[in-house]
Amino acid sequence: MTSHFTETYTLSNGVHMPVLGLGTYRVRDQEILDACLLEALRTGYRLIDTATVYRNERAIGNSLKRIFEQDLVPGLRREDIFLTSKLAPKDQGYDACYQAVQDSLQNLQVDYIDLYLIHWPGTARLKLPDPRNAINRMESWRALEDLYREKKLRAIGVSNYTLGHLKQLVQRPHMVHPHPSHHHPHQQQDPLPPGSVASIQAPTEHRALASTLVIPHVHQFELHPRLVQKDILDFCAVHKIQVQAYSSLGEGRLISLDALPPQKSKRESPSSSPSPPPVAPLGALEIMPYLIQKYFPSVNMSFERQEEDGVGTDAVTAATYARYSAKILLRWGLQHGFVVIPKSTQPERIRDNFDVFEFELEQEDMQQLDLYSLGNQRTRYCWDPTNVH
């Protein structure tokens, strides 16, 4: 397999971000993480995505330290790795956010983090409509701007923001408060790094209102054919915010053969009609068997659901379907220009998920997949931030 670990997108501040990374949600065991990270890095992955709420930063730091010190991936250095972490909702607010980043740096055992995101627009223990949610996340953003200026973070961004949350952050002035615990009022400050919308501002202590100084470099949110949020994508494009998709496989539902409805003949192309595809239960995409056989013709098998003595779909068939449908969904994201971060703890799947650079979906097939986000096809599998003030 050809190595593609050097393929990157360039963020608005010039930082290069790998187009594909390893997700680590719900993976906490040290031994499992050791095996996953080593397999991923040997395969070619260079982006590792974690978060405070995943409770695995320390284990990831331990794994990377071991890999570097023992040279388990020959020649690999810290600067070759793109580390992402995220702020927990309980740590919203300037001081709590600032300290949370220090804790992440210590847990990951690094001097800087490549990308740090506000994980959720709300604050723990506050109700969704509480206006303090908006105040707290703006204070958190101030802290990230300061840490970015201090070069503790190479890029900063947000996650799970709605269009309204993004507009509030990017386009409106906000109340700010001085934070003398981190910056002496007479201390010389470094100029803002590239990617900032302003490089000359009055000191924070002297401002009652301030505009966002650094436009988010990245927005990570749920994104797959059943949830294409075009308004957010358009806003990110205008403001040069790199889009990063999570749950590209719909929490596994989009690659489940068990949920597949009866199929047409494998030789029959899906309709080119602009109307949405038929409803399929549990998220399965009716077009997927056709796409698998089109782009992977050597896969010779029936995708019909099999029932024998009450037993469901054959396990081998289901595993093969999941393997190749995952490739197509990840490829769909890459061709839209998204960063994708599939998660797996299985070595073979880790390798398979990276092997998506040797084929390209035709435009007609991309459009057919996009149609699954229309009307009653639209499905959200993860957290819904819509009602967060």
Image (spheres, rainbow, N blue to C red):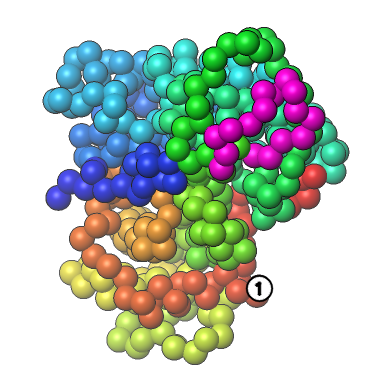
Q: Is residue 72 left or right of residue 165?
A: left
Q: Is residue 181 above or below residue 27?
A: above
Secondary structure type for disc 1: helix
Q: Is residue 198 magenta?
A: yes
Residue 35's quadrant in the figure? top left
Q: Position of residue 198 (x, y in %)?
A: 57, 39
Asked if residue 383 can be seen in this view, the reply is no
Residue at the location (62% across, 67% down)? 378
Q: Is residue 26 above or below residue 389?
A: above
Q: Amino acid at mark 1?
A: Asn
Provide the major secondary structure of the magenta segment.
loop
Residue at the location (54% across, 15% down)? 188
Q: Is residue 382 left or right of residue 313?
A: right
Q: Which residues are magenta?
A: 197-212
Q: Is residue 175 above or below residue 91?
A: below
Q: Position of residue 135 (x, y in %)?
A: 78, 34
Disc 1: CA contacts within 10 A as few (<14), some (14-19) or many (>=20): few
Q: Is residue 207 left or right of residue 87?
A: right
Asked if residue 42 can be seen in this view, the reply is yes
Q: Is residue 146 magenta?
A: no
Q: Nearer the viewer, residue 44 or 140?
A: 140
Q: Position of residue 105 (x, y in %)?
A: 47, 17
Q: Which residue is mark 1?
A: 376
Q: Position of residue 42 (x, y in %)?
A: 20, 34
Q: Nearer the viewer, residue 33 or 211?
A: 211
Q: Nearer the viewer, residue 48 or 199?
A: 199
Residue at the location (59% across, 59% down)? 235
- Quadrant containing the C terminus is top right
Residue at the location (56% across, 80% down)? 276
